[in-house]
Image (tube, rainbow, N blue to C red):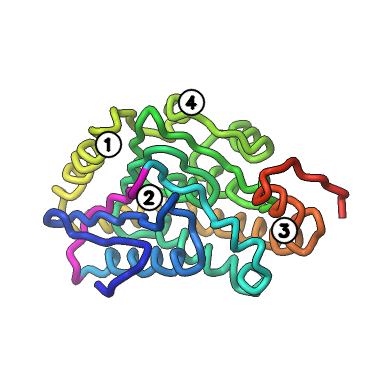
Amino acid sequence: MEHLDFIKVDIVEEGIAVVTLNRPPVNAFNLQMYRELHKAFQFTDDPANNVRCVVVCAEGKMFSPGNDVNDFADDITYQVANYSDVVAEGLDSVMLSKVPVVVAVNGACAGAGFCIPAVADVVVATEKAKFGITELNVGIIGGAAEASYCLPPKVVSYMSLTGRMMSARDMEKYSFVHKIVPEEQLMDEAMDIARAIAAHPPIGLRYSKEVLLKIFEPDVLAEKVEFAAEKNRAHKKTADFKEAVSAFLEKRKPRFQGK
């Protein structure tokens, strides 16, 4: 596996790969990190690497707040035509993984960061974990489509429209989180689940993933994500989008004009 700057890939046991988000201080995603996430899952998808289960976790006290908002203020970076395509390619690599994906969440997990557990197979979390579709807080349209993959419609609407965070206990009620454990037990629990998965025949696991993807219709989800991306591309041309980003970075209340 080639060296990656912001994503670590380690084969920790036979058949189990740990993919770690590692972009200090909070694991916010930039374009390079999305590309590296895609490369990581290309590696774990390759049968030659004998990966039967992937555990996704993060360094530090936060899983990921999603996109690096500083990119939104940089027209050269954010206004590029294929920005949303790079984001989609990175997140799709998790959803379309050819082997099962377990996500271990501690701390805040929001925006595009929230989309990772939303499209994974199993999620474990600590009491400190919080989840949110916070995109609209910074003028972004997104996250709701991925959330619709695993949450009831009214919950998706509430999270998307308010931008408020939900606790791990809240998400456990909606079966988003499989189990809540103390912080020091998070990786032990994730690895225990990964071992139970990896104990099965490798070809059978890949066929099982194909069946699950057929059941949950990722092609339909992809259409929803692309529709959201179209609306996002339109909104980022507005004055209100720029105001949302500026207000967030300047830590002040935004002044929207509907323009």
- Asked which quadrant contains residue 153, the reply is top right
Closer to the observer: label 2 or label 3? Answer: 3
Residue type, mark 3 in image: Lys
First of labels 2, 1 by sequence position: 1
Q: Tell me which residue sits at (61%, 71%) in the image.
A: 77
Q: How far apart, in angstroms, are the residues tagged by discs 3 and 4?
A: 29 Å
Closer to the observer: label 2 or label 4? Answer: 4
- Asked which quadrant contains residue 21, the reply is bottom left
Q: Which residue in the structure is indicated by mark 2?
A: 212
First of labels 2, 4 by sequence position: 4
The region drawn magenta spans: 48-60
* Disc on res. 186: 1
**SS for callout 4:** helix
Q: How far apart, in angstroms, are the residues tagged by discs 1 and 3?
A: 37 Å
Residue 54 in the image: x percent, y percent?
27, 54
Q: Are marks 1 and 3 in contact (CB under 8 Å)?
A: no
Q: How far apart, in angstroms, are the residues tagged by discs 2 and 1?
A: 25 Å
Residue type, mark 2 in image: Leu
Q: How far apart, in angstroms, are the residues tagged by discs 2 and 4?
A: 25 Å
Closer to the observer: label 1 or label 3? Answer: 1
Q: How far apart, in angstroms, are the residues tagged by discs 2 and 3?
A: 29 Å
**SS for callout 2:** helix
Closer to the observer: label 1 or label 4? Answer: 1
Residue type, mark 4 in image: Asp
